[in-house]
Image (cartoon, coloured by chain):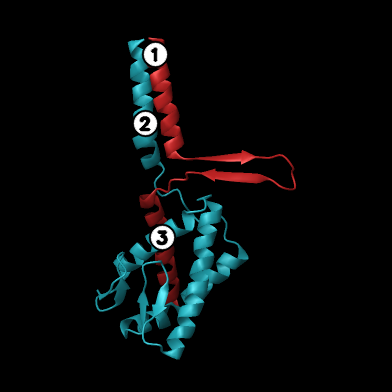
Chain colours: A cyan, B red
Amino acid sequence: MKRFVMFMTALFTFLTLAYPAAFAGKYDLKSITPEVNRALKGRQARYAQLQDMKRSGLVGENNKGFTASLKGDPAAETIVAAENRDRRVIYQALVDQNSLGPSGMMDVQRVFAEVQREKAAPGEKIQGPSGSWETK
Amino acid sequence: MMKRIRKFSGILMSALLIAGCTVKAVGDPDRPITINANVVIDIRGMKETATGIEDMVAQGGTRK
């Protein structure tokens, strides 16, 4: 019986600690649908222009995983709208294809926002988790 | 001893519930009901995925 108790304890530990760790990185775009493909291609096509706008302070990365127009520049507004539309498609595909549930979108957005903050170059505008904007 | 078994079974079931599960109830094939209960996202895993996607976008964008 002692063995049984030890086995159950080991199983419990594995399920709560080791099992999730073993599957880190399991999320993916499992299927590149035409819509997702268009979104990825669209983002790649405007990447250089978006980076220029970020460098000049016209565009920043908000804390919800989207870009934000910071100075009301019409060209920046257009780019931001298109970029955010494509990002939403990609985020939604991740949520749907990985069955992340009703709150999944918020988590995906939060994680992408964190990645964007990390990737931002010095001088670019980023919004922190608290909501305050800062220059990296 | 049965008390111990019951106790550990309880702990195990609680762990499974906390870890998250998806319950699929299918009655009418035209109207499948999906109940997502307590889905816990592995943030580290999602961050790796997000980084991979952003790298792909950046690399594709740089090549142009």
Q: Which residue is mark 2?
A: A14
With respect to residue B3, does A79 lie above or below?
Answer: below
Residue type pointed to by label 2: Phe
Q: Amino acid at mark 3?
A: Ala
Chain letter belonging to callout 2: A
| Residue located at (36% from left, 83% from top) | A70
Image quarter where the N terminus of chain B lies is top left
CA separation, marks 2 and 3? 26 Å
Q: CA distance from mark 2 to mark 1?
A: 23 Å
Residues at marks 2 and 3 on the same chain: no
Residue visible at 41% across and 43% down in the picture: A23
Residue A6 image position (x, y, % from top left): 33, 18
Q: How far apart, in angstroms, are the residues tagged by discs 1 and 3?
A: 46 Å
- Pick whichever of labels 1 and 3 is earlier in the sequence: 1
Kindly identify which residue carries mark 3.
B50
Q: Do we see residue A30 in this rendering?
A: no
Q: Nearer the viewer, residue A114 or A49?
A: A114
Circle 1 residue: B3
* C-beta proximity under 8 Å, tags 1 and 3: no
User: Which callout, 2 or 1, points to the residue nearer the camera?
Assistant: 1
Relative image position of residue B49 (x, y in whole percent): 42, 56
Mark 2, other Cα within 10 Å: few <14 / some 14–19 / many ≥20: few
Residue A29 x/y as whole percent: 51, 57
Residue in the picture at 34% in, 25% down:
A10
**Between residues B31 and A89, which one lies in front from this camera angle?**
B31
| Chain ID, mark 1 | B
- Chain at tag 3: B
Q: Is residue B11 visible?
A: yes
